[in-house]
Amino acid sequence: MRLFLSITMLIPLVSFGQEDSLALRNDTLDIKQITVVSEWRLRTYEIIKEEQIRELQPNDVGELVQKIPGFSLRSYGGLGGLKTATVRGLGAGFNAIVVDGFSLPNVQTGQVNLGQLKADNIVRLSFSGDESWNIYAPVGAIVQGNSLMIKTFEGEHSQESVSARANVGMGSFGRYEGFGAIKVSRKRWYASISADGRLADGEYPFKFQNGQTLISETRTNNQYSDGGMRGNLGIRTNKSGHFRLGYARQGIEQALPGAMILYNSTSDELLETRLNRAFVDGYMSIRRWKTRIYGLHQSRNVLYTDPTYLNQQGFLQQQYVTRMSELGGVTIRTLQKWWFSAGVQGRTTKLSGSEDQLGTPIRKHGIVLARLRFVGRIWQYGVKASGQYINEWNTNDSKRDYLAFNPEVSIRNKINSATGSRHWRHVLLYKRSFRLPSFNELYFGTIGNTNLRPERADQLRYQLSVVPVERKLDLDIRTSMYANLVSDKIVAIPTQNLFVWSIQNIDRVGILGGDAEVFFEYPSNRHTRKWWFKANANYSFQYAVDITDAEEPTYGHQVAYIPQHSGNADFSLHHDKVGLRLSNMFVSHRYALNENTSFNLVKGFHLMDATVFGTFKLKSMKLTLRATVKNILNTQYAYIRSYPMPGRNFLISLQYAFH
Amino acid sequence: MRFISTCFLFSVFLTACKKPVQPDAPDVSLDGGMLVLCEGLFQQNNSSISWVDFDNEMVINHFFEKKAGRQLGDTGNDMIRYGSKMYVVVNISSTVEVLSVKSGHSLAQISMIEGAQAKQPRSVAGGKGKLFVTCYDGYVDVIDTTTFEIENRIPVGSNPEGIVYSNGKLFVSNSGGLNFPNYDSTVSVIDLASMTEIEKIAVGVNPGPIVVDHEGDVYVISRGDYGAIPSRMHKIDPGTSSVTNFTFDASTLGVMNDRLLVGHTDFVGGESSVALFDAASESIMSSNWLNTNNATVYNLAYNPSNDRIYLSDAGDFSAAGYVHEYSSAGSLIRSFHVSINPSKMVFFAP
C-alpha cells in the first residue's frame, strides 16, 4: 500500500533575518559588529530565486530540486504524484523541508512528497548541506543531513502597504490551477491571506518497449485535485522583536495509478489527505543575542481506499491520523571573533487510525544543539554538536529508546574583497547525521520491524567556489567533492516469499562524488542593457555502491536509482520585458535493483523544456504571460521502472503582481 | 535546439556506455533440461523463464521473451506441464500463458481480468482435460485446454493459493493472506464431477504450498503468521479427509517418489535446511538431506528422468538466483545461475 505525503504553505510575514551563508551579500550575522567581507554573491542552483522559478514554470518543488547539483529525483509520475529526492547518495529521509521557518515532517512515511509542494508562491529555494546560522532554521532541520529551505511570497514582509499576487494557468491533461495572495503591512502589524487550487484529469499517453514491440497506452486513474488556504498575522513588538502566528490548511484528493503492469491496466486506488497546521513564533534581538522561540502543531489525516481489494469485505479502507506538536528555541550570540549558538527542540508525534495495521505509536523526540564558530584572520572554524533522545512506545507493547550524538566540524576561508582579482572560497566539512525509521517501517503490518536501528550517514565534503571580482567576464564557478558513508541503511526486502516483505537494517553504501557548476551572464550589468544572456550548467557524478558484504552479488554495484551522471544546462535570452528560456536536464542510466545487470537497467534520458514570457507593466501592476512546452522532444522516459512519465505537454499561465 | 539535444544525448551516451548486449533468440528444442520460472519482483514486470540444458550446462535466461518477442509480465507464480502444453500463471499481470511443450513458443495468452477486476491468478493444476486456476478473488477458474475459454468459476475460501488434483478431487489451500491478521486456515475440496466445493478441511493458519504424493496423499504447509505461529506441514487423507499434523519446520515441499523433500529457511537466523520425509512411515529420515550452504530454499523438485534433486535458491530475493543440482543421495553436483527468484521447475527428458 502506498501512502503519500501532503504539504502546506506557511505564511509568516516577517522577512528572514539571515540567509544561508553562501548566499549572503555579506558573510556575517551583523555587519556592524563583524569586520568582514562583502561582495560574495556566488550564483548557484543551490539557491533558486523567484525569477528563475517563474521562468522554469515547474509543476512542483520536485521539478525544481533536480536543478540542484547532487540531487537525484525519484518521481512516480503525474501531477501530485510521489516525488522524493536523494542528495549525494543519502536517502530522502535525511532531508528536512523547511517552509518559512517551520519544518514539514512526516513521521509516518519518513519522507515529504515534493510533488505536492507547489512552486506558485515560492520566492526562494535554497539547499544547505552546511552548517547554517540562519535563525529561522528549526533545530530539527539544523541537525538533519540536508535541509531544503523554502521562502514564500507570503513569508516576506513587504515594504509596500498592500501587495498582491495572482496566478491562473492551464495545461495539458486537463490541468487548471489558480493562486491568489494579498499582504497588508503597517508599522506595527501585518497580515496576509492566500488560497490556491489545482485540478487535472492526469491521463497522459506514454509508450514503452515490451520485448520487440513498442506499446502505446494511456496512464489512467491519475486524477488529481487540491486546494489550500493560509492566513497569518504578525505583530512587531518593538524595533528588535516581533511575534507571528498563522494557520494553513490543505486538502488533496488523488487517484493512484500505481505501477504500469504488463497486460493489466486495472487500477482504482484513491488517496485523500487533509493537512492542518498552526504555528507561532517570537523573535527577539537584545544586544548581541538573537533568539527565536517557535511552536508548531500539525495534523495529517490520510484516507486510503482500494475499492476492489481482494479481502473478504471486497474493499480496503484505512485511515491514519498523525498529530505532531513541536516546540523549540534557538539563540545566537555574536562577538568579534566568536559566534555561539544553542538550541533545543521537543517534538511529540502520535499516529492513530488503523489499529490492526500500525497500532498507536507515540514518539517523543528531544534535541539539544550547540554551535561555535571562530573567525580568524583567514579561516573560519566551526564546530557543532547535537544530542538527541527518542522515546517511543506503541499499543502493541513495543517500546524503544534511542540516544544519539552527532558531531560536525568545518573550516572555510574568509572572503576579502579588498585583495585579489577573484574570490576563492574553500569549505571543508565533516558531519554525522541519522534518520529515524518511520512509523510505517517500524510497525506496518507484517512489513514493519520494531528492531530497526536508525540509518546513519557520515559526510565529508570539500567545496571550492570561484567568483571573479572584476566583472568583465561575469562567471561563477563552484565545484565540490565528497565522500559519504551510509550505515545500517533501512531497506525493504522480500522475506519468506515475494509477498511477505520486511524492513531491515542491512546495507552499507559508500558514496564518492563530485559536482561542478558554472554560471555565466553577459553583459555583466544587465540592468543598463536591453539584451542580456544567462547560462548555467552543472554536472554531478555519484558513485554510490553497495559495500555491505563482499560475498554478495551486489557488492560494488551502483545502488538502485542513483545515476552516476546527471546534469543541467539552462539558457535564457532576455530583451527588455520578453524572453526565452531553454532548460535541459540529463540523467544517465540507472538500475532498478542493486544488481547491475542489463535486465535491471533503466534507460537514461534527456529532457528539454522551453518557456517564452513577456511582462507588461501598468503603474504598480505587473502582468506576466508565460508559455512553456515541457519535454519538447517528447522523450519517453521513467525515473522509476514501471512508472512512465508524460511526453510533450504544455502549460500557459498569467501572473498578476501588485507591488 | 536539435543541436543542443544532440550534444546532450551524445554526452549521455559517452557517460552511460555500459550498454547491455542482448543474446540472440534461441532456437532450441525442449529436451534434456528444465524450464525454471523466475518470479521476478513485484511491480518490476521482470518475471521470466530460464531454460537449463543439462548436457551442455547452458542457461538461457529470459527464454520466454526471446521466444515470444514480448515479456512474460509481473510476478510469475506457477508453471505446469499438462498434455502437450505448458501453462504459466502470472499473478500481477493476471494472465495464464500457454506454451508449446516441444518448442516453448507462445500459443496463447489467457487474460484473467473480469471487467475492471484483476483476479490475480496464483496456481494451476490440470485434470480431465481442464485447467484449474486458483484466483485471489476466492474462486477456482475452470479453463478448457483447447479453446482457452473460462467455462466455470468455483467459489472456495479466501485468497486461494495452491491447488492439486487427487482421487477425483481438487484440493485448494485457502490462505486468506489479504485478510491479515485474520488468515484463513482451510483447504477446500472440490468434487470434479459436480464442479463444486464439497468440504473445507481445517489445517493450520495461512495454508500455502500443497503437493500430492504417489499414493495420492495431500501435503500442505500452513505458513503461520510469520511471527509467533510457526510454519508447519499437514497431511490430508483424500479419502477420509483426516488430517495429520507435523511439528517440524517446513516452508516448501518437493515430491521424490514415495518421499518428500521438506525445505525450510530461517529468515531471522539465515539458516536453511532440506529434510527427507518418508511418506510411508510419516517420519523424518534425515533432517539435513541436502547441504544447502544456507541457500534461500525457495522451491524443491525431483527429476525422475535423471534421478536428481533441484533446489531453487532465491538468495536475497532481489538479485539473480541459482538452481542447485543434487544427486538423489543429497550430494551437490553443480549450480545454474538463472534470474531473479527462481521457483517452479518443469523437466524435459532427453
Image: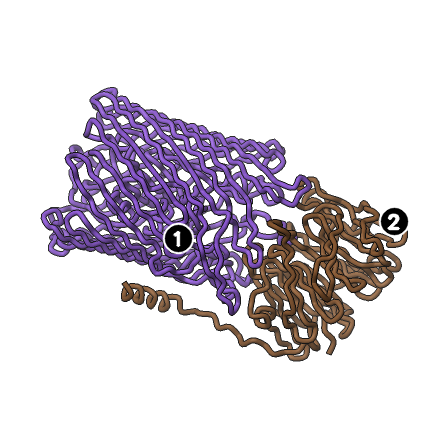
- Characterize the local packing of mark 1: few (<14), some (14-19) or many (20 or more) Cα atoms within 10 angstroms: many
Q: Secondary structure at mark 2?
A: loop
Location of mark 1 (residue): A72
Which residue is rendered at x = 25% and y = 36% of the image? A18
Image mark for residue B227: none
Amino acid type shown at disc 2: Ser
Amino acid type shown at disc 1: Ser
Which residue is rendered at x = 55% and y = 33% of the image? A361
Image mark for residue B242: 2
Between residue A188 and residue A560, name the one nearer to us.
A188
The subunit letter for the residue under badge 1 reads A
Q: CA distance from mark 2 to mark 1?
A: 59 Å
Q: Colour of chain B?
A: brown
The spot of residue B133 in percent (x, y) is 72, 57
The spot of residue A298 in percent (x, y) is 44, 30
Q: Is residue A589 left or right of residue A410?
A: right
Which residue is rendered at x = 48% and y = 55% of the image? A218
- For the C terminus of chain A, the quadrant is top left
- For the N terminus of chain A, the quadrant is top right
Which residue is rendered at x = 56% and y = 67% of the image? B70
> Mark 2 vs mark 1: same chain?
no
The spot of residue B291 in percent (x, y) is 71, 64
Q: Is residue A563 visible?
A: yes
Q: Is residue B274 left or right of residue A589?
A: right
The subunit letter for the residue under badge 2 reads B
Between residue B197 and residue B204, name the one nearer to us.
B197
Q: Colour of chain A?
A: purple
- Characterize the local packing of mark 2: few (<14), some (14-19) or many (20 or more) Cα atoms within 10 angstroms: few
Q: Is residue A547 visible?
A: no
Colour scheme of the picture: by chain
